[in-house]
Amino acid sequence: MKDQITETLVGLLVLAVAAGFSWFVFSTIGKSGNGDSLDVVASFSSIGSITNGTDVRLAGVKIGTVTDISLDTQTYDANVVLSIRSGVPVPEDSVAKIVSDGLLGAAYISIEPGASEDMLAAGSSFEYTQGAVDLLGLLGQFAGNGSGADSSE
């Protein structure tokens, strides 16, 4: 009988901890550092594996996230909305690049700051962007060019 009471109490403790953890997760989802953010747009010819929620980093530090992705049917570019913390000034001539964390790492958007004294405002867009690099395509081109280079004579 004593073992059943102990097991019941441990089970209730585990459920209480799980409920507390769930409450914490749901109460903090979607909140950034100070709650204020600046939405800017970047257009890319290829976004690779970028999705909603992907990190936006400056000097390796997370300063925001991707909040929306849409296709521009006129230019066939992907328009990506970046939500950047409002306390982080980003010069308007900055470059937004899609890079990956190592060879097999996750993709993220890296911002390389420019030299302009004017900062991006809400709703503005990056003038300079660099899309995702297709590593498998590059390897295929390299392997294809390397094996057939001497056979053309």
Image: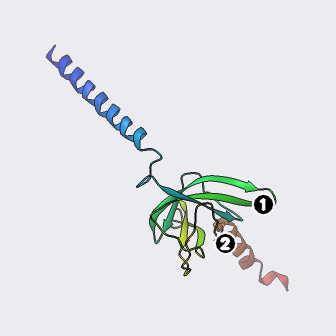
Q: Using the image, determine if residue 130 lies above or below residue 115.
A: above
Residue 108 as seen in the image, left or right of residue 1:
right
Pick whichever, 32 or 44, lies toward us. 32
Q: Tell me if label 2 and label 1 are in contact, CB under 8 Å.
A: no
Pick whichever, 95 or 120, lies toward us. 120
Name the image quarter holding residue 38.
Answer: bottom right
Which mark is first along the chain, 1 or 2?
Answer: 1
Q: Using the image, determine if residue 139 lies above or below residue 108.
A: below
**Image quarter hosting the N terminus:** top left
Name the image quarter holding residue 96.
Answer: bottom right
Dot label at residue 127: 2
Q: Secondary structure at mark 2?
A: loop
- CA distance for labels 2 and 1: 16 Å
Q: Using the image, determine if residue 22 lies above or below residue 42.
A: above
Residue 28 as seen in the image, left or right of residue 37:
left
Extreme right residue here? Answer: 153
Residue 11 as seen in the image, left or right of residue 26:
left
Q: Residue at x 26, y 24 (%)?
A: 12
Q: What x and y, as percent, mark residue 132?
A: 64, 66
Q: Residue at x 45, y 44 (%)?
A: 29
Name the residue tied to disc 1.
76
* Image coloring type: rainbow
Q: What x and y, as percent, mark residue 68?
A: 62, 52
Task: Identify residue type, mark 2.
Answer: Glu
